[in-house]
Image (spheres, rainbow, N blue to C red):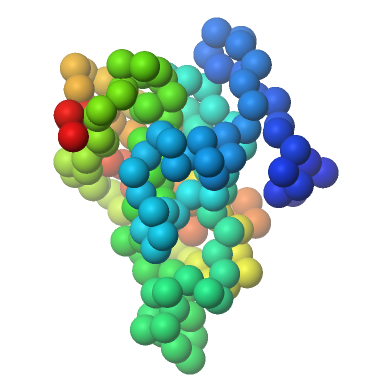
Amino acid sequence: MDANEGSGTPQAMTDATGETLEALDIARIMHAIPHRYPMLLVDRIVDMRKNHSAVGIKNVTINENFFQGHFPQHPVMPGVLIIEAMAQTAAVLVVETLGPTAAGKLVYFMSIDGAKFRKPVGPGDQMRIHVVKERQRGNIWRFTGEAKVDDKIVAEATYAAMILDR
């Protein structure tokens, strides 16, 4: 983790045109997507190239509501929620890429392919969620995603989403 990460100090990032952007904090994420506690699974976007890729952060804590039942004696983040964190990171990328034309639209899952879970994620882990746009055809976007903890892949998947009016 670099000196600015998690400090509240914006980090510089650039989009595909070379434009410098600030890191997206939780307020900007909540403006981009409608998810709220307990389903908001992205805390920060630390890198983004509009229309190409994004890296999101999810700080996993013992206070997550799913740990009450999954599993109380050995807390493990459910794999479907790791995939959901990937989808939310991609949804923020879509909204930031589309800009004002995304107003009044939602990003919906269409498919999940090749999901693999390589290592459990638990309290104290920081997931770095890497998503890359594979293609876009009309209102359908396809992504590959990887979730990493300590630079080791813990989950990966390819998935598609459709952008529709609310």
Name which residue lies at 62% across and 21% down.
21
Picture layout, residue 14 above or below residue 133: above
* 47 displayed left or right of 4: left
Which corner quadrant holds the C terminus? Answer: top left
Outermost residue to the top:
17
Q: Nearer the viewer, residue 78 or 105?
A: 105
Work out whether residue 87 can be spotted. Answer: no
Work out whether residue 121 can be spotted. Answer: yes
Measured as percent of width and height from the top left, residue 138 is found at 19, 17
Picture layout, residue 142 above or below residue 14: below
Outermost residue to the right:
3
Picture layout, residue 130 above or below residue 105: below
Name which residue lies at 57% across and 69% down.
61
Measured as percent of width and height from the top left, residue 162 is found at 20, 32
* 61 displayed left or right of 32: right
Q: Quadrant of residue 109?
A: top left
